Image (tube, coloured by chain):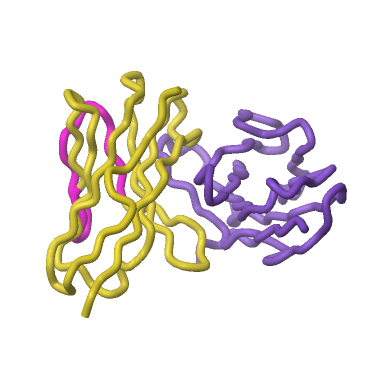
Amino acid sequence: GESVGLHLPTLSVQEGDNSIINCAYSNSASDYFIWYKQESGKGPQFIIDIRSNMDKRQGQRVTVLLNKTVKHLSLQIAATQPGDSAVYFCAENPGGSARQLTFGSGTQLTVLP
Amino acid sequence: DSGVTQTPKHLITATGQRVTLRCSPRSGDLSVYWYQQSLDQGLQFLIQYYNGEERAKGNILERFSAQQFPDLHSELNLSSLELGDSALYFCASSVSGSNTGELFFGEGSRLTVL
């Protein structure tokens, strides 16, 4: 069936470096994508979203890129900090509602000192 | 702190039993969502309520049910529990009238079925 998946289950980066977390989606009907961060013992926390009429959106230290041609999105985190260590999920809305999201399996980001 | 409160934080029970998980959304949020997070299935959408009415259903088993009360708190009832129901159950709420996917998640209820 159609799914949202992540290329790498784990990612380790040095503090201060930039991080790139990738996500592939397969539902071409999805027009809204969102990134969540989940720290250990906590619930997911919204980071940034993007609609399919855009290919890039920037937030504070984060940028999401969307490539509809290859059904790929990525989350870039600039100057990665220890507090960025968490599991990052991409999610899509295959059903048209911005809240009924299908989540990917997650990437564990570890920031090394 | 997201403002969403879930109880209990941890729950251990036996197969065949029934449990109720409770969620209080953020003040003013009319929508409540339930998600299940397990190691093999990831985050799965179960059900959504809006102002007391069921709005959308996801991969929710027939053994599971939910409701949202007039004070907007919600309960997720899990019955005839099986080992595979062991998971983290998250409740989330959202700002009414927003068209974004920003959900505010609670810290979850960890259910262990023995």
| Residue A36 picture location, percent across and down | 38, 51
Provide the letter of the chain coloured purple. B
Task: Judge by depth and name the residue closer to the eye, B35 or B50.
Answer: B35
- Residue extending farthest to the right is B17
Q: Residue at x 71, y 32 (%)?
A: B53
- Residue extending farthest to the top is A29
Q: Is residue A54 above or below residue B93?
A: above
Q: Residue at x 30, y 62 (%)?
A: A109
Task: Judge by depth and name the residue closer to the eye, A2 or B21.
Answer: A2
The quadrant in which the C terminus of chain A is found is bottom left
Left or right relative to B87: residue A16: left
- Residue extending farthest to the bottom is A113
Label total for image? 0
Left or right relative to A47: residue B97: right
Task: Judge by depth and name the residue closer to the eye, B36 or B67.
Answer: B36
Q: Residue at x 77, y 46 (%)?
A: B82
| Residue B109 picture location, percent across and down | 66, 59
The quadrant in which the N terminus of chain A is found is top left
Q: Color of chain A here?
A: yellow
| Residue B10 picture location, percent across and down | 70, 66
Task: Judge by depth and name the residue closer to the eye, B100 or B48.
Answer: B48
Q: Residue at x 71, y 59 (%)?
A: B112
Q: Is residue B44 above or below residue B4?
A: above
In the rendered structure, does residue B14 fall within the stretch colored magenta?
no
Left or right relative to B109: residue A43: left
| Residue B60 picture location, percent across and down | 67, 34
Specify start and end residues of the magenta stretch as a single range: A48-63
- Using the rendered view, name the quadrant where residue A49 is placed: top left
